[in-house]
Amino acid sequence: MTNLSLAKVFNLDMPEGIEIEQGCGGAFVPPQNPSYKLRKELARVMYGFFVSGDVALTLMGLQGCGKSSLPREWHARLGYPLMEYTCNARTEMTDLIGMYKPNEKGSLTFAEGPLLVCARNGYSLLLDEYNVMDPGVAAAMHPWIEGTGAYVPELKEFVRPAPGFRVFMTANPADAGQGFMGRVEQDAALEDRSWSVWVDYANQEDETEIVSQIFVKSGESPESAETVSKKMVEMANKLRKQFAEGRLKMAMSTRCLCRWATCATIFSNAGGDTTPLSFGLELAFTNKLPPEEKAAVNEMAYQMFGGGPKK
Ligand SMILES: Nc1ncnc2c1ncn2[C@@H]1O[C@H](COP(=O)(O)OP(=O)(O)O)[C@@H](O)[C@H]1O
Ligand SMILES: [Mg+2]
């Protein structure tokens, strides 16, 4: 049995003695993202959840705050298999447990779904956007996320999840007022069976580091990358405040900040009448806003970064 130090694996400033047993590896371990920065507050939750032996953990938060990437990168770096399934309004238990599929002999074979594969093998399952699923289907998940399992008639077998089986569920809040459509309030009984984590956008320091790496990768010096990233994060935080006050259609997410930075590096020599930053901002964010909000955000960018307002 090999133990991995979280401080070493994630390059975190924490005691090296905090360790997690290395996973079993294999084809279902996600690929690593070397740019991923594990936030300390989330490292603490994941560590606790992994050692608790519990099965289900729910990550709630606004778009692009780092929900899906957390279990993905945790499994990648620690060598644990993770299967991902993105839920939709028509997801049925058969999509998760399995269904009969035609085979080359012209008959039907039972193809196990991701939930069954994970439960039988002790893998993790990431159910992305779980609250767009019908609550009735989600209710059928109860015996699985409780770890008891259920009878699968097609296998003529009562399947008890193997040790190591875990379910991660991510969701945006079920709030159309905040721009999240088609999300359904889930049954309290489901939520009662799961750890619940609210994921905020990363703090200023962590988010600056996340954005900064994108500029550094494109050849920018660490100092100037940090200076510009800090200002971008500052602007994102101002926009988030405006969103929370109902003055903006959407918050600027970490995903959006990263795209803004990437676009700014791609178009750095493109010329034209806009700066790379303002062009990047448009592609990543402002083109999604109504005209008056777009103008206000461009004006804010002009005040903060200079370069001329985009008309
Ligand atoms: N801690 C992080 N380190 C590096 N990039 C991150 C981090 N958190 C978020 N990101 C960036 O933001 C994007 C969105 O994150 P994701 O976890 O997919 O958000 P969510 O699932 O909450 O919508 C990622 O693809 C990545 O580019
Ligand atoms: Mg996601």
Image: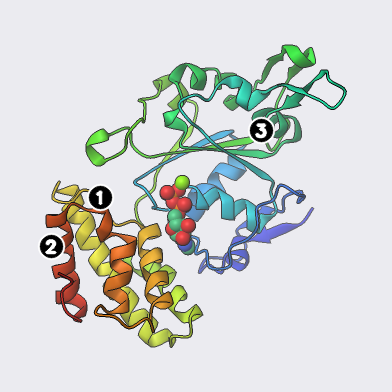
Q: Is residue 163 visible?
A: yes
Return the x and y of residue 235 as percentages of the image width and height: 23, 67
> From the viewer's perspective, is 116 left or right of 11?
right
Q: Is residue 265 above or below residue 124?
A: below
Considering only order in the chain, which callout, 1 or 3, is on the residue closer to the N terminus? 3
Marks 3, 2: nearer the viewer = 2
The secondary structure type at the circle numbered 3 is helix
Return the x and y of residue 182 as percentages of the image width and height: 35, 30
Return the x and y of residue 268 as percentages of the image width and height: 38, 81
- Residue placed under numbered mark 2 in the picture: 296
> From the viewer's perspective, is 218 left or right of 79?
left
- Residue placed under numbered mark 1 in the picture: 250
Label 3: few (<14), some (14–19) or many (≥20) C-alpha neighbours in 10 Å: many
- Residue placed under numbered mark 3 in the picture: 114
Amino acid identity at mark 1:
Met
Considering only order in the chain, which callout, 2 or 3, is on the residue closer to the N terminus? 3
